[in-house]
Image (tube, helix red, strand yellow):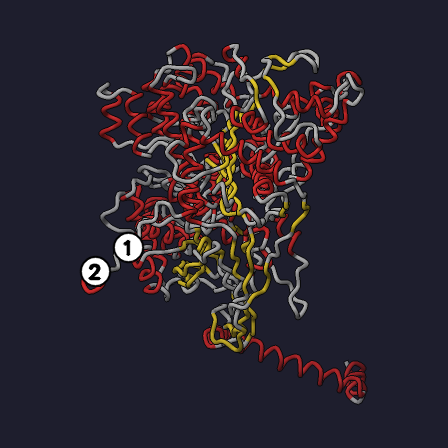
Amino acid sequence: MRHYLDHFRELCKSRIFVLLCGIFLLFFILLLRLFSLQIIHGEEYDASITASVSKTVNVPAPRGNIYDRYGRPLATNTVAYSVQIDDSITLDLTAYKENLILELTKKLWEKGATPFDTLPISSSAPYSFIFEGTEREQKKAEKSWKESQKLPDTIKDDDAGAVLNFLFEKYHAPAAYTVAQKRAYVSYCISLSDKNIMALTLALKLAENGETPSDELPLAREYPYTLQFNENQTREDNWKESMGMKDEELRYDSLQTLDYLRDYFGLPEGLPTDIVRDTLGIRYSLYLQRYQQYKSVTVATNISEKTLAYVEENQDIFPNVLVDTVSLREYTNGPYFAHILGYIRQMTEADYALYKNDLDADGNPIYTQTDIVGQTGMEKLYERQLNGTDGKVSIEVDNQGRRMSMIDSTDPTPGKDIFLTLDSELQKVAYDTLEAQLRKSIIGNLTHSGKNSVSIIDMYIAMIKANHISAAKLMRSTDGVQKQVFDRFMAANPDFSKEDEDAISRVQAYLLDSVARGTFSAREALLVAIEQGTLTATEEEKSALQNGHISPLTMVLNKLNSGEFSPADTALDPCTGAVFVTRVGTGEVLASVSYPSYDNNELVNNFNNSYYNDLLQDGNTPLVNRPLKQKKAPGSTFKMVTALAALETGVITPNTHIRDGGIFKDAGTPYARCWLYSNNGGTHGLLDVASALEVSCNYFFYEVAFRMGNAKDGTTEAGITTLNEYMAAFGLNSLTGLELDEYAPTMASPYYKERIVKTFNPDATTSQTRWTDGDTIRAAIGQSVNSYTPAQITKYVSTLANGGTLYRLHMINQLQNPDGSLYYKTDEIAENVKNFQDANLKKVYQGMNLVASGPRGTLRHSFSDFPVKVAVKSGTAEEDKTRSSHTWLVCFAPYEDPQIAITVLIPFGEGSGTPAPEVVKAIVTKYLGLDYTPENTNLQTVMTQ
C-alpha cells in the first residue's frame, strides 16, 4: 500500500499530470455548461433564440405583354391573391391539433366520409387488442404500443375497453360522435402529421369556397381521376418510379395509384376521394419543391375573399400558409390566338436543359427548375425577351424558418413587350365567319339531300372516330347511359381486359359497329355525348331526349344553331379550316386563323391536364397550327404561276387562244381531262389566258405546260424546269420566313417525285420515278406532288398582287423595353424581285377579276353583290376518294389597288355551299371598313351627351 502511495506522490510532481488534471477540469466545466444550456434551460433558450440567418429569395419579374399591331392586349398579366405554403417554416400544431381534427372530422362526416381508424383494438365490444404473432409477441407489441401512447401507470395493465375509453377522454372525443366516429377521431389525433392536417384543412376549405387547388399531380381532378399521360406508357412508368412505385405497382390504374399515393403521403383511409385528390395535390406540390428552401409553393390562385380572410385569421395556427399576390397570365382572346401565342407553364427537364446556362450580368443563373417558361408559340419563341430579370430580397429568418425582416432588395425588371403585326379585330372576324360558314354547311348537309348529305348516324360515326364520343371515357364510366353501353360490350366480350394494349380500339370498333347496326341508338349516342361533355344540355333537355319528346337530330340542329354545338364537335366534313391574310407590299401578317382552336387560358396558371389530354386525343387535331403546318395540293389556285411562266417565256402571248378539247392526249396515258368534260362531257371552247382563268379550264393549262417542254421535242424536263423557276420567284420552294415553326413546301419537281415515290416504295424502278409529260401538265394545274401551307400560298398571292417583289413574312412588328423605348424593330426584307411585264400581269389580274365578275366566272354568284372589285381564284384538290375534295380560295383586294392578300383552305369542303367566299368577303369588308357606321356627332348629339 505504501508503495502505491509513494508512486502517486511521484506522479503528482510530474508536469504532465498537472496538465492532464487541468484538461480534465476544463472538459468537466464544458460538460456542466452544455448540461445547463441543453437540459436545464434548453426549452427556455429554444423559445427565445432568434437566429440571424440571411437568405436570398428571388422576386419574379413581371412577364412582358403581347399586343396586336394597334396595341390591343393579347397576352397580359393580372394580379391576383394566391394561397402559398412556405415549407421552410416549422409547423407545430401541438396546441391546436384537437380543435383542427374536430373541425376536420365534422366536415368529413357531413361529406359522407366513412369513419376509419388504425387503433389496434377490435371494432366491437367486448374489445380486445388485435396484435399479430405469438402470444409473447402480441404481449410485447401491446406493451410497446401502450408506451407509445404514454398511458399512465394506472391503466397500463387494463383491458382494451378501458384503454379505448381513456383515449376518448385524453383526446376529448365529442360525445355526439358514434363509437366509430370517436375511434376515427382518436386515430387521426394519433397518426395524422401536422403537414397532413394542414393539407386536409386547406383542401376542405378551398372546396367549401368553390376553389380549385393548383398542382402538377398527373391525375385528373374528377372521378375516376385518370392518369394524365396521354396513353404514353414510358412517361407513366417514369413518373411512377419517381414516386417509389415498382414491379406490379407500375401497372396500377388511376384509382390504385391514388390509393398508393394516399399511403405514400400518410393520409388515412375512408376519406372522400375528391378530398384525397385535392389533398394529395397539395402534398405533391410540396414534395416537388422539397429541396427549394424559402421558396413558397402556390396551392391556389385567384382566391375568394372568404379564403383570403380564413388564411389571414389562422396565421397563428398555420404560420407557413401565406397569402401573396401573384401575376397570372391571361390571354384576352383565348382561342382566336392560341396557336400564335402559345402558353406558359412550369418548365420541364427539357426546358431546364435549354435555359440552365443562361446567366445574368453577375454570372448568376437566370432560371431555376421551378420557373415558368413559354411552352409553344410566341411565348416560347421570345421566352428570354418576355421573361425579364428577377429581383432579389435578402431576408432574416428565425429558428422556425419564419421571415423576420428584410435586409436588402433589388427590384425586378419586367420583360419586354411584343407588338405583333396581327390585327386582332380582323383575326376575330375571320375566325367567327369561318366557324359560322362551316356551321351553315353542316346544317345544310344534315337537312338537305344531295351529294354531300349526311345522316345523324354518319355524325355519330364521325364523332366516335374523332374521340368526341370517347371509347376511353366509356371504359371509365361508373353510371349513366355510358355504363349501360359498356356493360353490353362486356357481356359480348367476356375476355376483355382494360389492361390490353388494344382495349380502347376494341371498344371503339364495338361502338362503330353498334351504331351502324342500330344497337347503339341515336338517342343513346347523343346521351353519351352529353355525359362526356361534348354536348351541353340541361336536365330538362336530357329528360325530353330520353322520353322521346325531342328527336336527336332536332336537338343537334338546335344546339348547332344556338352555338352550343360547334362544327368541330360534329367531326363531319367540313369542320376544319385555315385563313391567312397578309399586307400586299410588305411581309406583315394581318391574320392567321386555325380552326378548330383551343383555349390556352386552360393551360396557363393552373394547367388543366384533362383538357389537354382531350386535345391530344381529338381527331380534329385542334393543336395543329393549320396555316403553317397543314399542307395540301393547291389545285387551280396555282394556275396564275403557270400563266405567268408561259407569258414571260413567250410560250403564249396575252392574245394567244387555245381551244378546250376536253381530253388532253399528248402527254400520254392516263389521259388528262378538263373538269367540265369530266362533269358533263362539255368543253369551254376557245380561250385566252384571262378567260381560261375565269372558267378555270384545265385543258388550257395542260396545253401551255406541254408547250413549255415535252417528250416529242426531247425537252420533257424543260417544262418543269421553267415552272420551278417561276414557282421559286413566288416563294413556293422555301419557307415563308415566319418566326413560328412551319412545314417546308413540296414543290413539284423530278427530285421531289423520286423522293416521294421511294418513300412509299423503296424498290421503285427508274421508270416509276422518272419525270414525265403527264407530271408536268398536272403540276401546271396545282396537282402532281405540289403541296403547300396556306401561309406559303398567301405569300405567293401577295407577291403576285404587288407585281413580283417577294417579301419575307413576319408576325413580329417590334419589341419595346419596359420604359417604352424601342428594343427591336422588324425590317421588311425583299427576298427576290421579279420584273414581270405589265401586260402579262394585267392579263392574269384580269382573269382573276373575271372569276368574281365575269359572265362565266366560277365565283360570279358569290361576289355578284359585293361592292368592291376583287381578284380571286378557287381551287380543289382530291386527297381521299371517299370524301370531298379540299377547297382553296385566294384573293387580293381591292383589284385596282391591292392592299391585302387572303387565302382560305377548307379541307374536304367541296360541294358544301360557299364558306370560303363568305370568309373572304367578311375579311375585305372589315379591312376596308365597309361595315363602318360613323357615330352621329352633330351639335345636338354632343349637347345631349
Q: In terms of sequence position, does the residue under pointer 2 or pointer 1 come before the other?
A: 1
Residue 557 image-quadrant placement: top left
Residue 880 sits in which quadrant?
top right
Residue at image position (69%, 38%) is 728
Residue 728 is at least partly visible in this image: yes
Q: Toward the viewer: 750 or 625?
A: 750
Instruction: Give 864 or 781, whichever is nearer the viewer.
Output: 864
Quarter of the image for the N terminus: give it.
Answer: bottom right
Reading the image, the residue beneath label 2 is 941
Which mark, by number, is residue 935? 1
The disc at residue 649 is none
- Image vertical order of residue 683 relative to residue 283, above or below: above
How many other residues sit within 10 Å of disc 2, few (<14), some (14-19) or many (≥20)? few
Disc 2 versus disc 1: distance between alpha carbons?
Answer: 10 Å
Q: Is residue 178 above or below residue 444?
A: below
Taking 152 as reference, is 17 above or below it?
below
Dividing the image into 4 quarters, which one contains the C terminus?
Answer: bottom left
Q: Amino acid at mark 2?
A: Thr
> Farthest front residue?
655
Please rate how many residues cluster around mark 1, counting C-alpha atoms within 10 Å: few if below 14, some from 14 to 19, many from 20.
few
Q: Position of residue 878 (x, y in %)?
A: 56, 21
Q: From this view, report whether residue 876 is shown above or below residue 25.
A: above
Question: Is label 2 in contact with label 1 (beta carbons under 8 Å)?
Answer: yes
Residue 259, visible in the rendered structure? no
Which is more toward the observer, 293 or 49? 293
Q: Which amino acid type is marked by label 1? A: Glu
Say what secondary structure mark 2 lies in: helix
Q: Is residue 412 left or right of residue 84?
A: right
Q: Which is more toward the observer, 778 or 826? A: 778
Horizontal and vertical percent for residue 295?
52, 62
